Image (cartoon, rainbow, N blue to C red):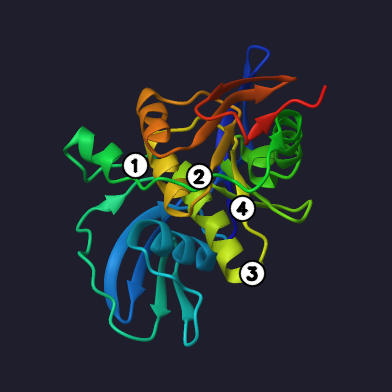
């Protein structure tokens, strides 16, 4: 199944109604299992599901695939998918009984302070990055979003990698799923270049900051705004947020020295 589907619609234009077809962002139910044990269920876009499982298990459960003996098998049944991940050794977890929706971040946490306090601090980066490079990379990502271009209903996340002018990009109907997918794509690639910045096609909420912190990514650049809890958590975690990064402008929140520069 692809990230897009066609649906019959009535289209209203210039005062008239006509029957037509519309390209729609596909949304499916995804169940993740580890060593035959159900871990969680997500609503997500159906492409790059192996990346989704790898990234989600790393960001949310601190499981470090891919490793020796790591295998992924995907079963499809109409709009429902089962991802079976096999790892060596025991995987201890508390399974979720509810579905993680495409808009859900810290849905299972009932203490605001815990969302901040349990987010790890990131290391300071080895080199600085030009804010114009972040803006240009976001523009580059925007030009590589076929799902959004076709439907207007998909988010994108990108990873800027050190030592290479390389940008990994993944799309999903859910913001946090797009982040999981691009994290998983990097992990599965076994690329030795480390992520220096996470790029977002929309806003930055707490859930995205938490995922980036768990992957030790020091900078998040987003086209949209950062939420108050995202800012609070980023400051606590030694992370820099670059919001509204477009058209030669940006709002920088958090550490700047040794991280963000403007060359001209």
Secondary structure type for disc 3: helix
Q: Give the foreground label among 2 and 4.
A: 4
Q: Earlier in the sequence, mark 1 or mark 2?
A: 1
- State whether residue 145 appears in this view: yes
Q: Which mark is residue 195?
A: 4
The residue lying toward the viewer, choosing from 64 and 18, is: 64
Secondary structure type for disc 4: strand
Q: Residue furthest top?
A: 15
Q: Give the residue pinned by disc 2.
A: 173
For mark 2, does the 10 Å Cα neighbourhood hold few (<14), some (14 to 19), or many (20 or more) residues? many
Q: Give the foreground label among 4 and 1.
A: 4
Q: Which mark is residue 189?
A: 3
The residue lying toward the viewer, choosing from 75 and 242, is: 242
Q: Residue furthest left?
A: 110
Tell me the CA gap for discs 2 and 3: 23 Å
Horizontal and vertical percent for residue 112? 22, 33
Horizontal and vertical percent for residue 67? 49, 80
Q: Give the residue pinned by disc 1.
A: 104
Q: Earlier in the sequence, mark 4 or mark 1?
A: 1
Secondary structure type for disc 1: loop
Q: Earlier in the sequence, mark 2 or mark 4?
A: 2
Q: Give the foreground label among 2 and 3.
A: 3
């Amino acid at each position: 199944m692809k990230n897009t589907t066609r649906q019959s619609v009535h289209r209203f234009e210039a005062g008239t109604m006509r029957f037509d077809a519309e390209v729609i962002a596909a949304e499916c139910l995804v169940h993740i299992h580890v060593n035959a044990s159900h871990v969680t269920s997500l609503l997500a876009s159906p492409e790059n599901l192996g990346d989704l499982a790898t990234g989600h298990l790393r960001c949310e459960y601190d499981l470090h695939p891919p490793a020796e003996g790591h295998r992924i098998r995907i079963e499809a049944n109409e709009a429902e998918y089962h991802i079976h991940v096999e790892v060596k050794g025991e995987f201890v977890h508390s399974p979720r009984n509810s579905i993680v929706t495409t808009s859900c971040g810290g849905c299972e946490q009932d203490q605001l302070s815990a969302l901040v306090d349990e987010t790890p601090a990131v290391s300071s980066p080895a080199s600085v990055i030009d804010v114009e490079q972040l803006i240009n990379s976001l523009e580059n990502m925007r030009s590589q979003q076929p799902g959004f271009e076709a439907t207007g209903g998909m988010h994108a996340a990108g990873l800027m990698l050190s030592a290479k002018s390389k940008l990994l990009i993944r799309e999903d109907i859910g913001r946090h799923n797009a982040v999981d997918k691009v994290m998983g794509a990097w992990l599965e690639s076994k690329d030795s270049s480390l992520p220096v910045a996470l790029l977002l096609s929309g806003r930055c909420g707490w859930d995205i900051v938490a995922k980036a912190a768990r992957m030790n990514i020091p900078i998040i650049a987003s086209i949209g705004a950062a939420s108050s809890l995202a800012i609070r958590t980023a400051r606590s975690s030694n992370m820099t947020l670059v919001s509204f990064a477009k058209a030669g402008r940006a709002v920088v929140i958090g550490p700047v020295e040794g991280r963000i520069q403007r060359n001209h």
